[in-house]
Image (spheres, helix red, strand yellow):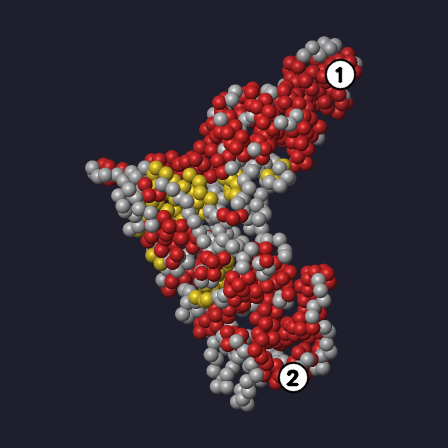
Amino acid sequence: MERPIKSQDEDVKFKKEKSFQDQDLESVQNTEAGSLEEAEAPNKKEREEKDFTERLLDLQQAISEMDKHGEEIDEDIFENIMDMKFSEFESLAHSGALIKDKDARSLHQKVSGILNRELVDDTQEYKGSRFRQIMNKPLSKVLFSALCLFFKFGVPAVQAHEIKAQEPKKIDTKIENSYDANESVLRDRSSDNTYKFDSHEPDLEELKDSTIMNMAQNFEIDKANISPADAEKIIAEYNNFLDKINVKNIDDALAKEDVIEASSDERATKYGAVDKKLAPTLENNINLTNDRAHIAANLLMEVKKNHDFSKSGIAEDKIEKYKNKEFKFKVPEKGYTKITELNEINPETGEKYTDQEVEEMKKNNPELFDELTEKCRYVSLDLKIEFKTSIKKVNQYDRIIFFVDNSPSTEYTMNDMARNLEELGLQENSKGEIAKADLVYYANAASPVKHLPDILAAAKDLKEKKVKGSSIEKPFLSSINYLKDLIKNDEEIAKNGGRVENYRGAIFTTDEGLQETENIFEVVDLLEKANIKDATVRLYPNDGQLPIEKNLFEIKDQVEKFIKVKMSADSAALEQSKITETMNLNKLIASVNEKVDSKVIQDFFGQEKIDNIEMVTKILENEDFKKPLKSSQPILNKLLTSGEKLMEINDLTEKAKTQTFEDYLKNTRIEIKVFTDDNGRQVNFDVLGYENNVKDKNNISVRL
Amino acid sequence: MSEINNLSFIPFVNFNDPVFIELDKKIRPFLDEKPRNLNRELQIRTLLYLNFNNYLTLLLTKADDSVAFETLSNIDKVSEDKRLELILKILNQPLEVIINSFLELFSKAD
């Protein structure tokens, strides 16, 4: 790997660079070393490709370092790194086409251009990304695979095979204690006393995929590069998805269009600029967006081609067809999305942001600017294959109110939500009409309600929505204001003799657990007051599972029921502790009477023997008696400790006797969360209850 | 099984049942580790109660789907002091075996 550097000036700097770089590369390769050793030795071609990749990595590192110092790579350095003449490299990069002399740029600029995939044609005019053109030319195959996969991701192609053998991505591994269907036992429990109870055995056949895979965060800033670690994540996630393709859904998978949607934000970039000294321009954004989309597609294509479908039962010809099915692309015309183009509402004006407001935001509220620009950046693939909904009763309603979670993570599930609504929108109510729809987006706050003519319009709104709310989520709380307004409005209508619409249902959609659920009682109360006869929570696990549908009123009932069980169990535990401690104290009294000098007992208890527990508790009420005993009489200390505990239990027992459900609720924090298991299939609700001021959480989950 | 999944906590055995006295004795060493931590002790006892009942439900649902569904659906009609007897009959396992396997998991879990 180490190669001598001829140029002395660059030598020191580059060796330093190399040292760091080799470490980096080594760490990447170490992860594969074991598997490679065990596997068959790479064939010659693979070795060559790998070596070439390493050289490209070196080259990129050198170029980048020299750029920083305003220096340029020369022919000697190039040949030392790449083990080839620049002309050969250039020819390879241009698919064997002749390079005309009129490309007067320096070698450094040419190499930079090639590495940035800005292959110049003979007129020197940049014609946009040529990845697809290159891909179609046999001579460029090696360079293509190196540039697109190895160099950009730093992951040798063979790794795609290896990574798919890894464990599927754990979307949420917070499941603390699940039932192991194979062993018929409870397994494991977390240290915070969580108990999870579920015997559901997921039916794999029923699983339908409905995930949007977002890769924007995997790209380096202002580059179309993906780090090896991020590439691994993408590969693992896509392999996880491909594992779910089976005989039942392959036809749907073949029929659907795999579209990679991508956009950059409105900040100008130097990406693709031949002269890096020039200021960034917005014109460069299209190149960045296109290249990111293509880089993502190339990686996914490679993963797909290397995926092992042998256990899926799918016919060979269909597998082949699926493997060769290409990705399509959808990017904004300019390659970027402006904040003003988002459906984001400025809370101060109730309207979309204007250019002037965005300019002010840049100066005065950079955090918000960053948050909004993040919404403009995406490189995503909708992985949906088939999706079936089972919301019942929706056709009973004249109006459905949709509370749609638009926190950032719903980028993965928003299309699923939309698709569900579309299905619902096809249902007619008893009058042969499609229900009207009120649409409220929420995260930590609800957006202004949209009154739409029907559910299909709501579905359309969701589909077009690229806006994300805050990452601070309060699924129910944020909807309360809307419900309050609804009640107020109904009251006004009734006062004026109008007909109050009382035949409506509500659906809350979220991909999160139901946090802040202590307010579930408040929300349900409001739903009832707002004449909402039915409300359903739809939980969208963001890993391609079926959504979970639960009636909010039922959840509230179950939470209530569980709290009552918990109250009863707490009381019974207290009672049991009281019995145990009483027995313990009586034994200690007998020991003290037997072992401690009667004069000592006389000093403290006023008589030679302790008659009963009450004598102990009485003495404990006097702190003066207790203190001297602590240091000198171990058995008396034990006695007093036990007595104190019993008194504490008695106090709590008295308190529990008078405690009402409302008291308990007031002093208890309850959360309902939904968890998926390691395979992302099983969904449970966790009800967490712990009393305020008690450090150890009493965390118990129940099925709802 | 989907119907069963909708069921929540089912009290098969109450705290004052001799089974719990037995269970409580067996977890005593566990509690004695921190004799002055009353909150911890109460939590463990509450968990013992909830978990043991849930464990019985699990065993039942695993034993036979149809019987389990019927039993769990009608459990409210069975008086509390008869529930344990009923479930032992369905499971056809000695109580001692059930207790031991449960306690093994319970102690591991903490």
Who's the residue at 40% across and 50% down the image?
A: A420
Which image quadrant is residue B36 in?
A: top right
Looking at the image, residue B38 lies above or below residue A543? above
The subunit letter for the residue under badge 2 reads A
Q: Is residue A17 above or below residue A181?
A: below
Q: Is residue A338 above or below residue A659?
A: below
**Badge 1: residue crowd in 10 Å (few <14, some 14–19, many ≥20):** some
Dot 2, crowdedness within 10 Å: few (<14), some or many (≥20)? some
Front residue of A627 and A476 = A476
Identified by mark 1, the residue type is: Ser
Q: CA distance from mark 2 to mark 1?
A: 95 Å
Q: Is residue B101 left or right of residue A423?
A: right
Q: Is residue A429 visible?
A: yes
Q: On the rendered structure, is A328 left or right of A603?
A: left
User: Which residue has dot 2 on it?
Assistant: A85
- Taking depth in this image into account, of A375 and A642 the one nearest to the observer is A375
Q: Which mark is residue A392?
A: none
Q: Under tag 1, what secondary structure?
A: helix
Q: Position of residue A613 (x, y in %)?
A: 66, 14
Q: Position of residue B100 (x, y in %)?
A: 68, 29
Residue A591: mark: 1
Looking at the image, is B37 positioned above or below residue A311?
Answer: above
**Residue shown at 57%/23% (left/top)?**
B86
B33 left or right of A198 in image: right
B15 and A58: which one is in front?
B15
Q: Chain of mark 1?
A: A
Kind of element beneath mark 2: loop
| Residue A473 rendering spot, x and y as whole percentages | 46, 47
The percent position of residue A646, horizontal first and vertical second, equals: 63, 21
* Mark 2 vs mark 1: in front: 2
